Amino acid sequence: MPTLPSDPTRPDSPPGISLRGWLDHLQQSGRLSVIRPGTDLRFEVAAIANRLDSHSASLFLEPGGHAIPVISGLLSDRGWMAEAMGVAPADVLARFQDASLNPIAWREVDDAPCQEVVHREVDLLKQLPIPTHNEHDSGAYITAGLLISRNPRTGVQNVSIHRLQVSSANRLGALLLPRHTLAYFQETESAGEDLEVAVVVGNDPLTLMASQAIVPLDHDELEIAGALHGEPLKVAQCVTNRIRVPAEAEIVIEGRLLANTREQEGPFGEFPQYYGERAERHVIEVDAITHRQAPMFHTIVGGGLEHLLLGGIPREATMLAHLQRSFPSVRDVHLARGGVCRYHLYVQIDKRSEGEGKNVILGALGGHYDIKHVVVVDTDVNIHDPNEVEWAVATRFQADRDLVLVHDSQGSKLDPSTRDGVGSKMGFDATVPLDAPTMRFKRIRVPGEQDVDLAAVSEPAGDDWQQRLAPSR
Ligand code: MN
């Protein structure tokens, strides 16, 4: 089995600071599976990665005959993300929020591992092991690439993940949602010019998470990555354009988002567990591929846990900060997995004033257009347990007075029940009225239940269990 070159580890840093260090960390705790050479890049890589999802990360050796291995499932569990950041699970949002508010500027270096090999003649499918994931995907997709662009006026960079269809040897079809990459592109396109970009594949877990921060335009997500690292991120300038990329990345695809060019892209299996439709979309022309001497290609299976959580946790941090600015009573938020870590927000508040639950609903719905349904609960409800939230709705909510309904608002274009992204929002105020009699909403509880030492008081029954019954007289 070929060995992968590993970076010198920095023992006092969180394990997520380098990709190879993180894979080492997973391997040492039995959470890295190696898949034998020869896996088919069409469906089989995704099938195996999905089966291992949340149990172990996967490392595919020589997939489809390619020398470059594929990795997947690096962060397919909430607890793993906490580990990567070096904090307790309860502190993930606070740590992420702190990094978003206190970014650390990157440091440029000349000598970048990600540029050890340079291909100026590009053939994407020949040079990279790019999988086809879901049944009706239009073909091979790059799904874990950080797309880095540059504000043509200010030079500030933006980082985001976009699905990238391999359309030909040197062309990628890109879905640009109405956010920062699109804003920069519209600037250059209106001047008739292309937008320089780089697509960076094979990033450390902290940089991956930072790319998903929901911060204002012209806040460079690589600086948030630096804050999560606790030191400036090393970057290097691309060989064909002015974009700066993480120097320790595995693979960089350099190119341009073409002005006045649209081509067919899709369908592609997306996070809501449906296919994003085929349509005329933006196009990247690739100018060069650079990579490490022996790189790894990271793929995220569309709709898998890694896909859901990577978007979900940074959004939770952003939403918690957003709500706490207006509502000091907000204790915690959670984007539930059943709501694809995007559409269903649970909010826990320490309610002090009547009506506060509804204000929080209104604030949450305004916080991000993806949020569709909001449930607000009291501090005695565990928002990380969907059964607890359902219980609160079942027993503390009355539709005639506790429901907030908004029609025809901007929602997620990937939600198939919307009309091209226009849909309804709904909020459930499942908090207890402040003037309710004390016993009415008191949760039942057996004293001492939490403290029982089961091993000390019980054992598995043997087949003599009937003989052990005391004779009654
Ligand atoms: Mn941004």
Image (spheres, rainbow, N blue to C red):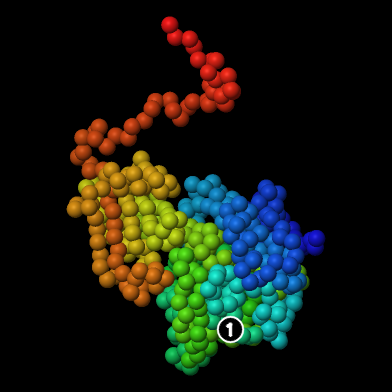
Q: Is residue 317 above or below residue 383?
A: below
- The residue carrying pointer 1 sits among few (fewer than 14), some (14 to 19) or many (20 or more) residues within 10 Å by Cα, namely many
Total residue callouts:
1
Classify residue 323 as left or right of residue 71: left
Q: Quadrant of residue 71?
A: bottom right
For disc 1, the marked residue is 167
Where is residue 194 shown, x and y percent of the image?
53, 88
Q: For the view shown, which residue lies furthest in the bottom direction?
A: 192
For residue 293, side relative to residue 304 (left or right): right
Q: Report whether the residue tagged 1 is closer than 8 Å to ligand 1.
A: no
Q: Nearer the viewer, residue 45 or 242?
A: 45
In this rendering, is residue 13 above or below 436?
below
Q: Is 23 left or right of 448, judged from the image as shown?
A: right
| Residue 79 visible at all | yes
The part of the image, by quadrant, that contains residue 183 is bottom left
Q: Position of residue 413 (x, y in %)?
A: 39, 73
Quadrant of the frame with the N terminus: bottom right
Instruction: Determine whether, in the image, residue 377 is placed left or right of residue 98.
Output: left
The residue lying toward the viewer, choosing from 325 and 447, is 447
In the rendered image, the quadrant that contains the C terminus is top left
Location of residue 100 in the rendering, given as x and y in whole percent from the top left corner: 48, 61
Q: Residue at x 47, y 53 (%)?
A: 93
Residue type (three-letter) at the residue carrying disc 1: Ser
Residue 165 position by quadrant? bottom right
- Give me the residue at 32% from left, 47% from top: 377
Q: Eyeballing the image, is 63 above or below 359? A: below
Query: Which residue is at 27% across, 44% downward?
Result: 396
In this rendering, does residue 235 appear at all? no
Residue at 58% across, 53% down: 54
- SS class of the residue under badge 1? strand
